[in-house]
Amino acid sequence: AAEVALEHSKERGRNNICFFSPVLHEQTLSRYRINSFLHQALEREEFTLVYQPQVCLRSGTLLGVEALIRWDSPELGRVAPDDFIPVAEDTGLIESIGAWVLDQSARDAADWLAQGLVLKMSVNFSARQFQRTEVADQVLRALQTYRLPADQFVVELTETSFLHSAERTEHEICRLRNQGVRIAIDDFGTGYSSLSYIRQMSLDMLKIDRSFVSGVQAGSTDARLVQAMIDMSHAMELIVVAEGIENEQDLRVLHELGCDQAQGYHIARPMRAEELVKWAEHYQANALLSPDDSAQL
Ligand code: C2E
Ligand code: MG
Ligand code: MG
Ligand code: MG
């Protein structure tokens, strides 16, 4: 009905009354509601972190995890990060949320380390965190507090992060890298990255966006695109991670294309810290690739 109303208003021309679309209304309302409840979410301890395993595509070995935020609001229910992170970015709340994510993820990584579980910790950062706060200091301080080795920590940034305050972002990234922290470019292929930019930036890893990975068919255009991204990354000595491995075929295709690491529902869903420890205990690296496959390896 909303679309019909909009179509009508277009047909009638610009000078006519503008129909108020219920769909648009719902979106503005929820953004508004998200904003009003987001302010108290931190102090009310409504955030948690879940961790999704990342494995080596050649051996199946568990290498690390990506920390992903979850918000369970008593008023709104579970709100997806894709819905509230943009609001947090607009309002500046991302700075305190980001600080919490950093602290909690470093704390959990230290806990695992104490239990003998060595895992790389990847944490998502918003562009805004790089513009407004001293991110490098923040990260290095957290690593020091929890006695974590810098090379076990990965900062994930999207391509678009580099568009805003490019100089500042670059400066912070260089400081982190000089201390051994790894930098990954997230959702690669969906932003506005230029090859020259990627070449200039000091990066360690590139994560191919799941839109290229999930459901990829061997020999398809997408497969060739993925192949090109992998070759390009390797030419720049970057480690390539495929996100969104949803089934056996995605895993097989990416393995054949020479991708280094993988992450996705087929391997494991994101889980709570305690759950992850149990999962890691029972995980069998050689069972990930089918028996036929592992015979060839
Ligand atoms: P992202 O960093 O690209 O994270 C990957 C997203 O893909 C996660 O969604 C994850 O749950 C989902 N995913 C993993 N495997 C699969 C799969 O096989 N199939 C499909 N369809 N999806 C898969 P999630 O947790 O909803 O997070 C969405 C985005 O929100 C993240 O994308 C990231 O950009 C942002 N985000 C999440 N946590 C944080 C955070 O702590 N700070 C910031 N700044 N952003 C965050
Ligand atoms: Mg990410
Ligand atoms: Mg991603
Ligand atoms: Mg994403």
Image: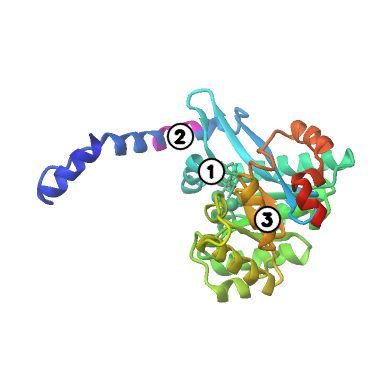
**Does 41 appear above or below 101?**
above
In three-dimensional space, the C-alpha distance between marks 1 and 2, rounded to whole angstroms, equals 12 Å
Badge 2 marks a residue whose secondary structure is helix
The first of marks 1 and 3 along the sequence is 1
- Residue at 75%, 31% in the rendered image: 275
User: Disc 2 designates what residue?
Assistant: 34
Q: Quadrant of the C terminus?
A: bottom right
Tell me, yes or no, whether the highlighted magenta stretch contains residue 133.
no
Image location (x, y in percent) of residue 28: 35, 38
In three-dimensional space, the C-alpha distance between marks 1 and 3, rounded to whole angstroms, equals 19 Å
Give residue 101's quadrant in the image: top right
Front position in the image: 269 or 87: 269
User: Disc 3 designates what residue?
Assistant: 155
User: Disc 1 designates what residue?
Assistant: 93
Q: Which residues are magenta?
A: 31-37
Badge 1 marks a residue whose secondary structure is loop
Prevalent SS, magenta region: helix
- Residue at 48%, 31% in the rendered image: 37
Image location (x, y in percent) of residue 182: 73, 60
Instruction: Say which of marks 1 and 2 sits in front.
Output: 2
Image location (x, y in percent) of residue 147: 85, 48
Report whether the residue tagged 2 is closer than 8 Å to ligand 1: no
Tell me, yes or no, whether the highlighted magenta stretch contains residue 33.
yes
- Residue at 49%, 61% in the rendered image: 191
Front position in the image: 40 or 55: 55
Give residue 260's quadrant in the image: bottom right
Q: Amino acid at mark 1?
A: Leu
Is residue 177 visible in the rendered structure shown here?
A: yes
| Colouring convention used in this rendered image of the protein | rainbow
Numbered tag placed on residue 159 in the rendering? none
